[in-house]
Image (cartoon, rainbow, N blue to C red):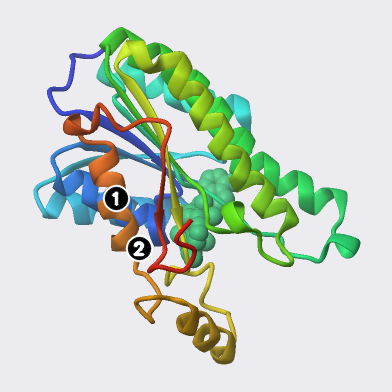
Amino acid sequence: MAESNEKRVAFVTGASRGIGRAIASRLAADGRHVVLASRSEGPLNELKTEIEQAGGSASVCAVDVGDGAALAAAIEGVFKEHGRLDILVNNAGITRDNLLLRMSDEEFDEVMNVNLRSAFVACRAAARPMMKGKFGRIVSIASTSGLVGNSGQANYAASKSALVGFSRTIARELGTKGITANVIAPGFIETDMTKDLPPQVTDHIKGLLAVRDLGKPEDIAAAVAYATSDEAGYLTGQVITVDGGMTMC
Ligand code: NAP
């Protein structure tokens, strides 16, 4: 095992772009060593360079979170290399939208595998290192779709809603070990996932929001920074909705 790193070590999935990229940058700026995980190595290497140029510390882990064995091995590899794993952010996610009557088994299964099963596999792999360190902060990125539903997203909403029950259960199982588990539910955030929405849909959405504007990836990163901080030890089993006042539930 390599020498223990003094910095807290964070594993962030879906770090190549969008919300995950902002989360990784923020955690690095807050002094964590961040393991940048997603499938595309090029953008991860660029982000690593950017973080290091800003005085932070990061490493790259090219992994498909839909491949459970590879994901578990990646997390075990982080513990072997650093001797610790303190923070896990399950952020990688996909949509395969379709109305219920048209949704295929493949569309349902793929979304559940990438959005939900990956969080189960990652948490199971991270739990032992966190228990050894008597400290852990787990955050899973869900969605307001999983709280209030969204037409065309039966698969996606089910996967995000399930993250809530999953996280609350592991919060109960791991709470006495210094490990917390929370969910952050973003509303509409400006990323690749939402960039193809027609302008009239975006305008309609803005009209539903108390702040009348879409969110930025940094808005979610700020919530993750708090939920994964040392001082957030009494925050667990919660859903923090960051949606500009869309749902208020
Ligand atoms: P995005 O811009 O589409 O980025 C998705 C990220 O997930 C990318 O880094 C992608 O990296 C990674 N990813 C996808 N499939 C993967 C796989 N099989 N293995 C490893 N990494 C994978 O999405 P985003 O908007 O930032 O969304 C991030 C999270 O927030 C998702 O869980 C999403 O459901 C949630 N969310 C987003 C919004 C929104 O309005 N944007 C709202 C609510 C919730 P690679 O392609 O390089 O693998």
Q: Residue at x 66, y 53 (%)?
A: 156
Relative to 198, say whether 62 is above or below.
Answer: above
Q: Residue at x 47, y 46 (%)?
A: 38
Q: Position of residue 209 (x, y in %)?
A: 43, 76
Q: Position of residue 179 (x, y in %)?
A: 34, 20
- Mark 2 is surrounded, within 10 Å at the Cα level, by few (under 14), some (14 to 19) or many (20 or more) other residues, namely many
Front residue of 111/17: it is 111
In the rendered structure, find residue 217 and report the number of the disc placed on it: 2
On screen, residue 141 versus residue 198, left or right, reads left
Relative to 49, say whether 177 is above or below.
Answer: above
Q: Quadrant of residue 17?
A: bottom left
Q: Residue at x 30, y 20 (%)?
A: 81
Query: Which residue ends up furthest to the left in the rendered image?
Result: 55
Query: Element at badge 2?
Result: helix
Q: Quadrant of residue 19?
A: bottom left
In the rendered structure, find residue 157 and report the number of the disc placed on it: none
Query: Which residue ends up furthest to the front in the rendered image?
Result: 249
Q: Does mark 2's beta carbon lie closer than 8 Å to ligand 1? A: yes
On screen, residue 96 versus residue 76, left or right, reads right
Say which of marks 1 and 2 sits in front.
Answer: 1
Front residue of 157/102: it is 157
Q: Position of residue 222 (x, y in %)?
A: 25, 53
- Mark 1 is surrounded, within 10 Å at the Cα level, by few (under 14), some (14 to 19) or many (20 or more) other residues, namely some
Amino acid carrying label 2: it is Pro
Residue at the disc numbered 1: 223
Query: Element at badge 1?
Result: helix
Front residue of 217/13: it is 217
Q: Could you tell me how far apart the alpha carbons at marks 1 and 2 are, in whole angstroms?
A: 10 Å
Amino acid carrying label 1: it is Ala
